[in-house]
Image (spheres, helix red, strand yellow):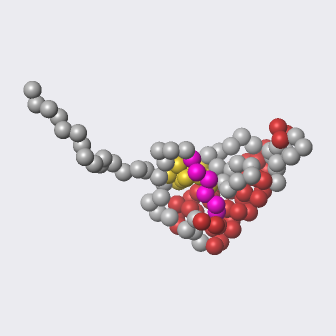
Amino acid sequence: MDSLSEPTQWDYEVTVRYKLMPEYGCSPVWKLSDGPAENVPISELPLSTNLRESIKQWDDIFQATFKSNNPADSGFGDLKAGGEFLGVGESLVEEIRRELPGVDIEYCRIDV
């Protein structure tokens, strides 16, 4: 019976993906890999200054919906404002894809 030799080196590539998903109290950009998701500060992204600022402004709008006295009531007060916010997020992901071709980034729509 032939014995199988153990591979001495793993031949695989770790895939890194990014997600744009707002979350209270942190950056809306997440690095996804085989391990836990890692929050990425907007300032560390290799994007144009204008796009980084647009992402920050978009996130500031979301952060302003947090109600510290009753977090369960946090969120947009009306569907129109929430829908506009989601639409801007989709546009930001498209802009990120244009500036970083080949980077896998997805948009996670949240309940508004």
Question: For this view, does 27 lie left or right of residue 60?
Answer: left
Name the residue at the left extreme.
1
Query: Is 39 one of the magenta-colored residues?
Result: yes
The quarter of the picture where the C terminus appears is: top right
Query: Is 80 one of the magenta-colored residues?
Result: no
Q: Tell which of 11 and 19 is nearer to you.
A: 11
Tell me which residue sits at (61%, 57%) in the image. Answer: 40
Name the residue at the top extreme.
1
Q: Position of residue 72 (x, y in %)?
A: 82, 37
Among the 4 quarters of the image, the one containing residue 27: bottom right
Q: Position of residue 22 (x, y in %)?
A: 69, 50
* Range of magenta residues: 37-42
Q: Position of residue 110 (x, y in %)?
A: 68, 43
Q: Position of residue 64 (x, y in %)?
A: 82, 54
Q: Tell which of 7 and 94 is nearer to you.
A: 7
Tell me which residue sits at (70%, 48%) in the image. Answer: 23
Question: For this view, does 96 lie left or right of residue 28?
Answer: left
Establish if 18 lies above or below 48: above
Establish if 35 lies above or below 26: above
Answer whether residue 87 is visible to the viewer in this image. Answer: no
Name the residue at the bottom extreme.
49
Question: For this view, does 58 lie left or right of residue 100?
Answer: right
